[in-house]
Structures are given as structure tokens and as C-alpha cells.
Amino acid sequence: MIYRELGRTGYKVSQLGFGAMRLPMVGEGEDARIDREKAIPMLHRAFEAGVNYVDTAVGYCNQDSQRIVGDALKGWRDRIVLSTKNHEYDDEKVWWQHLENSLERLQVDYIDIYNHHGINWKTYVEKVEPNVSRWMRKAKDQGMIRHICASFHDDNEALVKIVDTGYVESITLQYNMLDRQLEEGIAYAHEKGMGVVVMGPVAGGRLGTSSPVLEQLIPGVSRVPELALRFVLSNPNVTVALSGMGTMQMVEENVVTASDEVVLSDADKAAIDEQLARLANMADLYCTGCGYCMPCPNEVNIPHIFQKYNEARVYGLWEPSRTSYQEWKWVSGKQADACIECGECEEKCPQHIPIREQLREAHEALMQK
């Protein structure tokens, strides 16, 4: 296993981290719980292979993730950097209760990396700086946590601002082959001595499948998940790539990839950059995601639908795109067939896309089994 320094924390951490939010489950709905007979051996196998960074949170896996991680840590605690999160920003009593519950569920005396869960610049200015930071610092002074960190969902400008506050020592954020928008901010954070932990290196599972397009990018790397992980780890500004591993096979495959000193050559990275740029330009021919077509009078999320359609036809990611689109109905209730063909969107589209026609095409293609 290869290790990198997690910014100012001083920890030497494995460049592969175990994200404990996709552990195997048994049961359904609110009664679903982690299959401990599968999950704990997976965590132990990762630890044995040198993975020493594990990340969880209060709500992961129906609030069962912390308990399983705690059980898996027995006998390993002094060798593992433990990261978890607190999603409360308003009620101090609730915030402290989350922390106490986490310590109890994880069966530990302290947490190494304690994160504000999912901050943006607005949250930092309005919630963290005036109030929640005081609770964090008090918890650190009391020895309940070792390092104040955060997970982040915002843009480069907000990331740079948060880095410049000097408040957090490590930040967890989204970055992968399909979402490189924070690349500039990641470089800045690393330059300023901050640890950078990447969540979603396989794009929330979208790159965890086959793609005849992406499988041809790099000679000798035929599996898309391996390519995705290698891409993230090839960025020298990234400290850890968190993989949400749900099977023992994923653990074994990811450990092999993360133990390879030559993650990607400069020529490989140049080839990926060139091909991804070409594919992105091709996707922009269909829709740039500018959002000028919105709002739709019948609440059809046009940019989201076209994003899924583009990921399928441009990147060859048909299986995850279809799954996401078909599940979208249960989230929003509106798919492309809800279009009433009023034409308002086409009047606003700067690319003059025949949106009504492409919505019909998208629905037909993405609804296929």
C-alpha cells in the first residue's frame, strides 16, 4: 500500500480509503441493516492490506455504518485513522448528542478526523464560523476529537475561501473523471497544506460498470472502475480516494490498484485529458447544462435528463444512466414523457436544441431494460 501525508494533521494515510456508506445490506426499507458477516471481513481484509483510513457518518447504511465500523476496529484502533461526520448546524444539544452517539457506536474514546458534514460557503459563514466552530473547538479541547475537518459541496471559489480561513485541516470533496470542476481548488488546498480526501472516485457508481468508450482509453486498463480510481490517485494533490466498497471483490481489486506505484503515466494522463475533452465537447453539442431552458412549466428537469442521456450515448454508460433515470421517477415524479410540448424551453435554449424531440428520444432510450 502507498501512503500520503494528510496535510497538517501529520497522519500518514493509505491513498485508498474505505468509505463505509455502501456496505452490503440485508432486509428492506427502514428495517435494512448491514450484513455484518460480510462487511466486517471486508473491512478486516482492507486493514490487512494496508488501508488505514476509514470514513463513516451518522446516517450511513440506515445509521448502522458506525456500529459495524466500531466492531471492525476492535484490535485495529491504534493503526486506523477514523473519520466521521456531524450534520447538525443549528441545535447545539443535538450536535453534542451526535458526537456522543458516534463515540458510543464506534466504541472509541476519540475520533481522529471529525467533519462538518456537507458544508458550502453559505453554511460556513452563517452557521460554522459564528456557532458550530465553537462546539468543534470545545470537543477538541476535551480530547473527544483530534482534528477539525469538513466534507464539502460547492464550487472552486468557495473552496478557496474555506481553505484561506485556515479553520479545517482536511477536506473531503467530489472529484472523478466525469466531474473535474474542483481540480483548481484541490491544487490550491494541497498547496496550502490541507489534506484532500476524494469521495466518489467512481462517480457514485456510474464508473463502476462497463463502457466500450472508456475501456479503450488506456492500453492495459480494461476495467472502468480501475481506470477511474487510477485517474484520481494520479492527481498528486489528492491524499486519499475513498471507495465505497460493497463486496470483497471490490476490496481486493481496489487494493491491487492502490498498491501500484505507477498509477498512470504522464502519457496516460495526457491521453485521458485529450479524450475526455473530446467527449465533453461532443456532449456539449447536445446540451451544455446551462439551465436556460428552466423552469419547465410542467416541472420536467430537462438538464438532468439530458445529463443522463449524454453520459449514456457519449461515455457509453448505459446501465447506470438507465438505472438512475428510471429511479428518478420516484424522486421527482417527472420523467421526459411528462413534457407537454409547449415549446417554452426551445425558445430559451441558446443552442437551439430541439428539446421536445430529444426528450422523446431520451425517454425511449433510457427506459429500455
Image: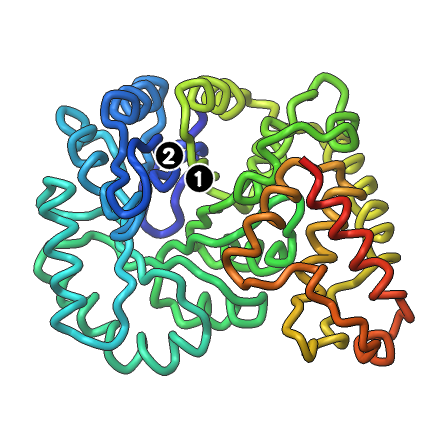
Which residue does the image show at 40% across and 35% down from the upper left? 17
Where the C terminus falls, by quadrant?
top right
Which residue does the image show at 38% across and 54% down from the upper left? 170
* Residue 18 - label: 2
Q: Amino acid at mark 1?
A: Leu
Where the N terminus falls, by quadrant?
top left
Which residue does the image show at 12% across and 53% down from the upper left? 101
User: In the image shown, does 104 or 188 lie closer to the viewer?
Assistant: 104
Query: In this rendering, would 104 be left or right of 18?
Result: left
Between marks 2 and 1, how big is the CA–CA gap?
Answer: 6 Å
Q: Amino acid at mark 2?
A: Phe
Query: In this rendering, would 4 be left or right of 131?
Result: right
User: In the image shown, does 270 or 123 lie closer to the viewer?
Assistant: 123
Quarter of the figure with residue 228: top right
Residue 1 vertical placement versus 110 (above, below):
above
* Residue 353 - label: none
User: In the image shown, does 114 or 22 lie closer to the viewer?
Assistant: 22
Q: Which residue is mark 1?
A: 242
Query: In this rendering, would 67 be left or right of 2?
Result: left
| Number of marks in the rendered image | 2
Query: In this rendering, would 7 be left or right of 203?
Result: left
Q: Residue 336: x, y in percent?
A: 71, 60
Residue 365 vertical placement versus 230 (above, below):
below
Q: Residue 259: x, y in percent?
A: 49, 21
Q: Secondary structure at mark 2?
A: strand
Labels 2 & 1 near each other (Cβ < 8 A): yes
Q: Residue 347: x, y in percent?
A: 87, 80
Which residue does the image show at 82% across and 42% down from the upper left? 274
Q: Residue 25: x, y in percent?
A: 32, 33
User: In the image shown, does 300 or 274 lie closer to the viewer?
Assistant: 300
